[in-house]
Amino acid sequence: MKEKINHALHIFFFAAGFVILLLISSAIVIPKNNAKEAGMLEINPNGILAERNHSIDVLVLGDSEAYSSITPMQIWEQEGITSYVCATPRQKLDKSETFMHQAFENQNPKIVILETNLIYREFSTTHTLSQLLDNTFPVLVYHNRWKSLTSSDFGGRIQYTWVNDLKGYIVHKKVKSISPKDYMKTTDEAAKIPLRNKLFIEKMYKYCQDHGSQLVLVSSPSAKNWNYKKHNGIAKLAEEFGLEYLDLNLYEDDIAIDWSKDTRDQGDHINYFGAVKVSEFLGKYLKDNFHLEDHRNDPMYADWFESLERYKEKIASAK
Amino acid sequence: MKSYCSLGYLGIFLPIAVIGYAFLPKKYRWMFLLLCSYAFFWMLSKKLLIYILISTIAIHYIGIWLGFIQKERDEKLSTVERGEKKAIRLQYQKKQRLVLAAAICFHIGLLVLLKYSPFLAKNVQSLLTMLNVPLKIKIPKFALPIGLSFYTLQAVSYMIDVYRGTIKPDQNLGRLALYMCFFPSLMEGPICRYAQTANQLYSGEAVTYHNLTYGSQRILYGLFKKIVIADRLNLLIKSVFSDFIQYDGTVMLVGAVLYTCQLYMEFSGTMDVVIGSAEIFDIHLPENFQRPFFSKTISEFWQRWHITLGLWFKDYIFYPVSMSKRMKKLTMNARKKLGNHYGPLLAGSIALFCVWICNGLWHGSGWNYIFFGLYHFFLILSGSILEPTIRRITDALHIKRDSKGYHLLQIGKTTIFVIIGELFFRANGLTAGLAMFKKILTEFSLSSFVDGTLLNLGMDLYDYVVVLLAVLLVLAMSILKEKGISIRDMVASKPIYVRWAIYYSIIMLIIIFGAYGEGYAPIDPIYANF
Amino acid sequence: MMEQLIEILEDIQPDADYETCTTLIDDHILDSLSILSLVAELEDAFDVTIPTVEIIPANFNSAQAMMAMINRLLEEE
């Protein structure tokens, strides 16, 4: 018996030592700035780390649909509302949750928009466990930085200074048209949402409630990815959880997406010209439905006008 | 969970299996292992589970049937006079052979159907097109259950062993099922014999602290080989082999060498993880690797590389073929005409040819795999043919064949032959392989080593350094093991702070220098499509 | 019978002392090709069938072991 306790203690202390090593190595390899040169990964969504504390009104989470359709700078110019898009390709809900938690460390957005395309994306327990481990021990994500460590990595402070002028939006001006058939043809069927995903959304909207925020579901226009069946599935979910749901695919007159000019890949994603239309509509929607302040006269937000100038230059020179 | 070196297996599946097993009473442990094994199978192949269930039930009843025939024979033999015994033996042997042949045809037939029919169909189609026959054959596509090539060989070995009387047919379907499906060896081997593992699997020995730690250390070492070395090399291997046309002979050579390294590190590393996993349950699986690159001949290489496959071919193809009546006659006659060395070589080479066609094809259905098998057949055969000549030459030149220098020479030449073989093994088809080999001979340039070409293939200088240092570490460990030193025992004898320093070092080396995460594509295990 | 066995062995591989050596397989004095010849010749000479399972080092490491095996197989017949 004594031997068994001895063994158990060995295992426990070994594991504890391992955890300590992971934490120390994480502290060393974690990027000390959110710029690409500092070794930061996913710099587009992580640009939010450099935004002034409590300055973001709207947080957008989602996959490539989100970062292709919504351009926060346009909404700023139009309505004076600040937003940021924390979206990554093929994002899954456990990653959305991670971005949400990260954002709420320094921000308190009143609205959290969840782009609905990823609600149908399945993922495994292993994926979520892996995500959890990555969040707890960043060395698992940034271990490759051993190739580029500098002296400031050992004991240096973390200071996020890289400001993303596009605020998470990624600009594409390419045009690849499509003439969609049966786009949003009505049906009574509702697509099924995986149970795991429903539970995650429940967790997320409760988190929002606890933090004085509101979770809003939004579907970007996509002739290829979206259909009425999926709409019904989300509508059902929204009703069940008492969430606002805005399906931008149903505002063909107001938004007027021209699928011959406004898509970059035959209806999968809209391009810059489509994003302009979407963001204009979305900006108005946000202003009309939620009591969000117009910060354009607030001197604290002068930096957003500076970003706007640089944003316009970037858009002009983009392809 | 796609491989043994994944978070899913090592972080979730295996711990649950170990904990469940440890806390169950002894008599239920084998059932739990069986449950885990089927769950493992299901997670990887879903409904294809039916295939292994069918095979298991089939060999169970075939074994019992053979047992009946043998029992009948023995009863008859006990009642009969000395002189008649041989005839009766022959009669019952014929009966058994019929049953066995049918059973083997079923199993191998199923394997051929699932795995090789697309290849066969494609070739028949090409033949027909060549002969201007306007027939279109539908190329079948079957989903393969995980471990098909491995458990099929285990099934066949079980039945042949029952036929030979080496083992008694297993009346216990559950034990047989566990022998067929044990999750550590299911996906990539080692190929186990019933006599070796069935009772170990069934007896439900306890998880001891010793086995837990030793097994975990072995798993760690395997992870190191795979994740730090093999996976790091993968980016370079992928670009060189898929895009070979744009590269020169030097790159081809580097690709072949590094692929051989990747293959060894991945396969032997996975074996470490697998054997280490089984060790935790006090189950000792046979070794599959024994420092193969210390081999002095290709024959020796195949006794040290994928050992259980070589043993299977030796016991179930080489000996049965070379010891068949016709072959024995051939051997005796040939010995009279060709002498002691070349006489038996005739029957030996026919048997060897059968083995190598099977070995090549077992690895994959494609002409480059057949070529691979024949290449090694040719090397082993020429080795045997040239042996007397080489002996005479070295004697004449007073070169000592048991000197360290000569051994190193032999090891070097063997390694080169192996590397060339692996080039064809990995190439995207035989034509590509031949083209790549040709490039090595005609487009080789020393300058490519120093002008930065090698740094544009997917690995930078840091990657090369890490691989080199890690390989040196593995080499050092291999040299110790070759000398018979048990490294785990050596470490276990050191004081606790030294031991823990070593374990933590290996773990952190894997975490920091492992080729996983951003920038490294997930890799399908090389041997898992079998 | 023992003389006959030793005769056959010396015919196949002359360089060994079959009276005393007990490591014919372990020391690679008899290689795989010799075994092929040996089994064929033994079966022919002693009119016995040597099944594959008997081809193990224990049975072939010495002339004595081979003789014991042959006798056992003859007995079983």
Image (tube, coloured by chain):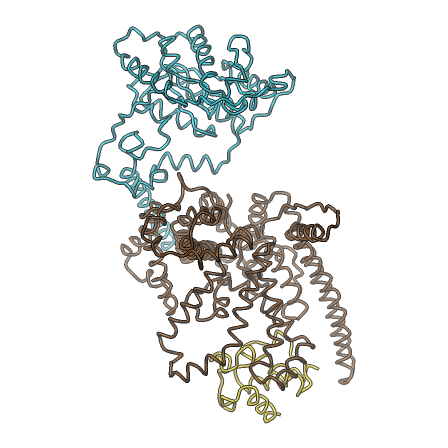
Chain colours: A cyan, B brown, C yellow
In percent of width and height, residue B278 lies at: 49, 56
Q: Residue furthest front?
A: B442
The residue lying toward the viewer, choosing from B513 and A93, is B513
Asked whether, in this view, residue B403 is left or right of residue A190, the answer is: left
In the rendering, at what x and y percent does residue A29 appear? 29, 39
**Residue C7, percent across and down?**
58, 92
Question: Up-down: is B402 above or below B219?
Answer: below
Place of residue A269 in the rendered image (x, y in percent of width and height, measured from the top left): 50, 23
- The residue drawn where x is 38% and y is 75% is B406
Question: In the rendered image of this protein, does residue B92 appear above or below residue C10?
Answer: above
Total number of numbered discs in the rendering: 0
- Asked whether B523 or B151 is in front, the reply is B523
Which residue is found at the position 25% from the left and 30% from the top?
Answer: A158
> Which residue occupies the extreme bottom position in the image?
C3
Image quadrant in which you'd find residue B487: bottom left
Residue nearest the viewer, comparing A42 with B488: A42
Please give the name of the residue rendered at 28% of the width and 8% of the height, measured from the top-left corner. A298
Residue C56 visible? The answer is: yes
Q: Is any part of residue B55 visible from this angle?
A: no
Q: Is residue C8 above or below residue A273?
A: below
